[in-house]
């Protein structure tokens, strides 16, 4: 399976499990559209109730689900009933409510429904670049029995360690920071060139789609290229053009 096909599969996983047409109505859990054919490709599924993007929320998904805690709990319970493998994890990612008591209540409902763990992003759905509220995450952790993962405003390995210590959570999740620097957890402050070369090799071997290949390089080279170079690189439209650019500006690629 190619990286592109796997990404598509995972991106559509919840829709395939519950049925996209049922995510925005009250009868989704009685639809019979829950499917398990994707399970053989992964060890768990995460219900993302933390995405704040407007188009996602308009579809009744992402952070819009935070106002429907019973539906989230029903999804978890429904999935748990349909998946026989007890080692298969079913987790939830959420954002904070402005009233921390509602966040705690949601987490308790999700825990009771059978969630394996919960990832808590330290911002509300309306917040973007504001500092993450790690104190609120620590409070959630202090009252829960299942593992809690901290997320939000983690841009380096040192920050990951600091957040883990501050919140006393069972782990940390990093998103944007790892897109920019996939080698962050190895202690690198920026993407090493070997990582770029590995990405070129892997995507060539897998026959990955250009958009996926190019976008990840845009992330990884953000702190390496100058502003004019980034502008030029972002406008490239073929793999050959990308390789030519990298050969000219960074290194020789055989």
Image (cartoon, helix red, strand yellow):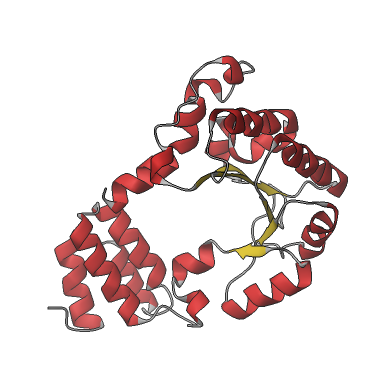
Task: Give the left or right position of residue 151, taking residue 227 as reference.
Answer: right
Quadrant for the C terminus, please.
bottom left
Of residues 231 and 16, the one nearer the viewer is 16
Residue most extreme to the left = 254
Q: Position of residue 227 (x, y in %)?
A: 39, 75
Quadrant position of residue 40: top left
Q: Position of residue 243 (x, y in %)?
A: 18, 71
Q: In percent of the image, x 32 and y 63: which residue is there? A: 234
Q: In percent of the image, x 72 and y 65: which residue is there? A: 131
Q: Position of residue 26 (x, y in %)?
A: 64, 17
Count of labels shown? 0
Q: Position of residue 184 (x, y in %)?
A: 50, 76
Of residues 184 and 111, the one nearer the viewer is 111
Q: In percent of the image, x 73 and y 64: which residue is there? A: 169
Image vertical order of residue 117 relative to residue 181, above or below = above
Image vertical order of residue 176 relative to residue 123, above or below = below
Quadrant position of residue 52: top right
Of residues 10 and 190, the one nearer the viewer is 10
Task: Give the left or right position of residue 175, taking residue 143 as reference.
Answer: left
Task: Give the left or right position of residue 231, taking residue 107 as reference.
Answer: left
Image vertical order of residue 2 relative to residue 79, above or below = below
């Amino acid at each position: 399976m190619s990286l592109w096909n796997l990404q598509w599969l995972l991106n559509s996983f919840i829709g395939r499990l519950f049925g996209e047409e049922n995510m925005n109505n009250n009868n989704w859990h009685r639809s019979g559209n829950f499917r398990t054919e994707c399970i053989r490709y992964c060890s768990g599924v995460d219900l993302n109730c933390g995405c704040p993007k407007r188009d996602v929320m308009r579809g009744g998904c992402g952070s819009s689900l935070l106002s429907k805690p019973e539906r989230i709990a029903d999804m978890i319970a429904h999935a748990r009933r349909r998946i026989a493998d007890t080692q298969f994890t079913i987790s939830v990612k959420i954002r904070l409510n402005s009233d921390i008591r509602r966040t705690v209540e949601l987490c308790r409902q999700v825990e009771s429904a059978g969630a394996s763990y919960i990832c808590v992003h330290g911002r509300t759905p309306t917040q973007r670049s504001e500092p993450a509220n790690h104190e609120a995450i620590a409070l959630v952790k202090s009252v829960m029995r299942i593992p809690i993962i901290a997320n939000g405003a983690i841009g380096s390995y040192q920050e990951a360690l600091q957040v883990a210590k501050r919140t006393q959570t069972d782990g940390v999740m990093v998103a944007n920071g790892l897109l920019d620097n996939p080698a962050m957890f190895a202690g690198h402050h920026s993407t090493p060139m070997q990582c770029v070369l590995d990405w070129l090799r892997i995507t060539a071997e897998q026959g990955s789609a250009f958009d996926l290949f190019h976008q990840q390089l845009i992330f990884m080279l953000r702190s390496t290229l100058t502003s004019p170079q980034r502008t030029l690189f972002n406008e490239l439209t073929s793999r050959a053009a990308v390789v030519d650019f990298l050969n000219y500006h960074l290194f020789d690629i055989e």
